[in-house]
Amino acid sequence: MLTPIFLGKVLCAEPGPPSSADNLVVRGTLVCLEKGSDSKEVPCLGERKSMGLRTATGQVYPLNDDKSTSTLLEEKRLRTREFQLTLKKSGASYEIVKSQFFRDGKLYDFYYFCDVCNITTHTPGLCMCCRQETEYHEKLAD
Ligand SMILES: [Zn+2]
Protein backbone atom coordinates (compact mmCIF):
# COMPACT_ATOMS: atom_id res chain seq x y z
CA MET A 1 0.00 0.00 0.00
CA LEU A 2 1.25 3.43 -0.88
CA THR A 3 1.85 5.91 1.87
CA PRO A 4 0.48 9.32 0.95
CA ILE A 5 3.20 11.88 0.52
CA PHE A 6 2.27 15.37 1.53
CA LEU A 7 3.98 18.12 -0.38
CA GLY A 8 3.38 21.68 0.50
CA LYS A 9 4.24 24.09 3.21
CA VAL A 10 7.02 21.95 4.56
CA LEU A 11 8.98 22.61 1.35
CA CYS A 12 8.70 26.33 1.91
CA ALA A 13 10.79 26.32 5.06
CA GLU A 14 14.08 28.11 4.68
CA PRO A 15 16.92 25.64 4.82
CA GLY A 16 19.12 26.06 7.85
CA PRO A 17 22.64 27.39 7.48
CA PRO A 18 24.70 24.67 5.81
CA SER A 19 27.48 23.18 7.86
CA SER A 20 30.59 24.52 6.23
CA ALA A 21 33.12 22.53 8.21
CA ASP A 22 34.11 20.14 5.43
CA ASN A 23 33.25 22.21 2.37
CA LEU A 24 35.94 23.08 -0.08
CA VAL A 25 36.06 25.90 -2.58
CA VAL A 26 37.41 24.91 -5.98
CA ARG A 27 38.05 27.06 -9.04
CA GLY A 28 38.18 25.44 -12.43
CA THR A 29 36.69 24.58 -15.78
CA LEU A 30 33.56 22.54 -16.19
CA VAL A 31 34.31 19.31 -18.08
CA CYS A 32 32.32 16.28 -19.15
CA LEU A 33 33.59 12.90 -18.03
CA GLU A 34 33.21 9.43 -19.43
CA LYS A 35 30.46 7.56 -17.62
CA GLY A 36 31.92 5.52 -14.81
CA SER A 37 35.18 7.44 -14.91
CA ASP A 38 36.12 10.24 -12.56
CA SER A 39 38.90 11.73 -14.65
CA LYS A 40 38.64 10.85 -18.37
CA GLU A 41 37.35 13.90 -20.23
CA VAL A 42 35.00 13.59 -23.21
CA PRO A 43 33.21 16.20 -25.33
CA CYS A 44 29.95 17.49 -23.83
CA LEU A 45 27.87 16.21 -26.75
CA GLY A 46 25.09 13.72 -27.21
CA GLU A 47 23.85 11.71 -24.30
CA ARG A 48 24.18 13.11 -20.83
CA LYS A 49 27.61 12.78 -19.38
CA SER A 50 29.01 12.80 -15.91
CA MET A 51 30.55 16.13 -15.13
CA GLY A 52 33.47 17.43 -13.20
CA LEU A 53 35.45 20.54 -12.41
CA ARG A 54 39.07 20.59 -13.61
CA THR A 55 41.38 22.91 -11.70
CA ALA A 56 44.34 24.80 -13.15
CA THR A 57 46.61 22.09 -11.76
CA GLY A 58 44.69 19.41 -13.65
CA GLN A 59 42.92 17.84 -10.72
CA VAL A 60 39.36 16.80 -11.55
CA TYR A 61 36.56 16.91 -9.00
CA PRO A 62 33.71 14.65 -10.18
CA LEU A 63 30.33 16.25 -9.49
CA ASN A 64 27.08 14.64 -8.40
CA ASP A 65 24.72 13.96 -11.28
CA ASP A 66 21.99 16.29 -10.11
CA LYS A 67 20.24 19.45 -11.12
CA SER A 68 22.77 21.82 -9.56
CA THR A 69 25.42 20.22 -11.76
CA SER A 70 23.43 20.09 -15.00
CA THR A 71 22.40 23.73 -14.53
CA LEU A 72 26.04 24.76 -15.00
CA LEU A 73 26.01 23.21 -18.46
CA GLU A 74 22.43 23.95 -19.45
CA GLU A 75 22.03 27.54 -18.26
CA LYS A 76 22.99 29.42 -21.41
CA ARG A 77 22.89 32.81 -19.68
CA LEU A 78 26.04 31.94 -17.76
CA ARG A 79 28.08 32.09 -21.01
CA THR A 80 31.13 30.59 -19.34
CA ARG A 81 32.71 27.30 -18.38
CA GLU A 82 34.80 28.80 -15.59
CA PHE A 83 33.37 28.31 -12.14
CA GLN A 84 34.11 28.63 -8.49
CA LEU A 85 32.19 25.91 -6.70
CA THR A 86 31.78 25.24 -3.04
CA LEU A 87 31.78 21.46 -2.82
CA LYS A 88 30.96 18.86 -0.25
CA LYS A 89 32.18 15.28 -0.54
CA SER A 90 29.28 12.94 -1.25
CA GLY A 91 30.37 9.34 -1.76
CA ALA A 92 32.66 9.10 -4.78
CA SER A 93 31.77 12.54 -6.09
CA TYR A 94 31.02 16.05 -4.86
CA GLU A 95 27.79 17.83 -4.15
CA ILE A 96 27.60 21.49 -5.13
CA VAL A 97 26.82 23.63 -2.10
CA LYS A 98 27.27 26.94 -3.90
CA SER A 99 27.92 27.88 -7.53
CA GLN A 100 29.66 31.01 -8.76
CA PHE A 101 31.12 31.72 -12.18
CA PHE A 102 33.90 33.72 -13.76
CA ARG A 103 33.33 35.95 -16.76
CA ASP A 104 35.98 38.37 -18.02
CA GLY A 105 38.06 37.55 -14.94
CA LYS A 106 35.34 38.62 -12.53
CA LEU A 107 33.53 36.40 -10.08
CA TYR A 108 29.74 36.43 -10.18
CA ASP A 109 26.99 34.94 -8.08
CA PHE A 110 23.94 33.66 -9.90
CA TYR A 111 20.63 32.51 -8.60
CA TYR A 112 16.96 32.13 -9.38
CA PHE A 113 14.55 34.21 -7.43
CA CYS A 114 10.83 34.10 -6.68
CA ASP A 115 9.71 37.61 -5.79
CA VAL A 116 6.38 36.33 -4.51
CA CYS A 117 7.92 34.15 -1.81
CA ASN A 118 11.28 35.92 -1.56
CA ILE A 119 13.00 32.57 -2.13
CA THR A 120 16.39 32.13 -3.78
CA THR A 121 17.48 28.87 -5.40
CA HIS A 122 20.39 27.76 -7.54
CA THR A 123 18.43 25.68 -10.01
CA PRO A 124 16.03 27.00 -12.65
CA GLY A 125 12.37 26.14 -12.84
CA LEU A 126 9.26 26.66 -10.78
CA CYS A 127 9.37 28.08 -7.29
CA MET A 128 9.33 25.22 -4.80
CA CYS A 129 6.71 27.09 -2.81
CA CYS A 130 4.20 28.82 -5.11
CA ARG A 131 5.08 27.05 -8.39
CA GLN A 132 5.61 30.27 -10.32
CA GLU A 133 8.54 30.50 -12.71
CA THR A 134 11.63 31.83 -10.95
CA GLU A 135 13.73 34.55 -12.51
CA TYR A 136 17.44 34.35 -13.36
CA HIS A 137 19.72 36.90 -11.69
CA GLU A 138 23.45 37.42 -11.64
CA LYS A 139 25.61 39.90 -9.76
CA LEU A 140 29.25 40.50 -9.03
CA ALA A 141 30.32 38.53 -5.99
CA ASP A 142 31.17 40.53 -2.90
ZN1 LIG B 1 7.25 31.40 -4.97
Image: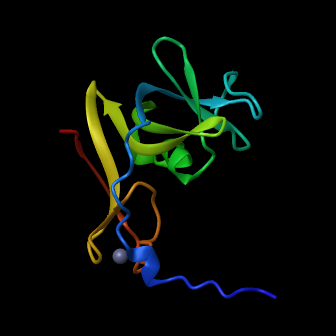
| Above-or-below relation of 119 to 7 | above
Asked if residue 88 lies left or right of residue 5, the reply is: left
Residue projecting furthest to the top:
57
Q: Quadrant of ligand 1?
A: bottom left
Locate residue 12, reporting x and y percent. Answer: 39, 75
Locate residue 20, reporting x and y percent. Answer: 37, 42
| Above-or-below relation of 113 to 66 | below
Residue projecting furthest to the front:
21
| Residue at 39% over, 47% down | 19
| Residue at 54% over, 82% down | 7
Locate residue 35, reporting x and y percent. Answer: 76, 35
Asked if residue 61 lies left or right of residue 109, the reply is: right
Residue projecting furthest to the right:
1
**Viewer-proximal residue among 17 and 54:** 17
Asked if residue 51 lies left or right of residue 77, the reply is: right
Q: Which quadrant is home to the C terminus? A: top left
Q: Which quadrant is home to the N terminus? A: bottom right
| Residue at 41% over, 54% down | 122
| Above-or-below relation of 35 to 74 | above
Q: In the picture, residue 108 is in which quadrant?
A: top left
Locate residue 51, reporting x and y percent. Answer: 61, 35
Asked if residue 121 lies left or right of residue 87, the reply is: left
Residue projecting furthest to the left:
142
| Above-or-below relation of 51 to 136 | above
**Viewer-proximal residue among 94 and 53:** 94
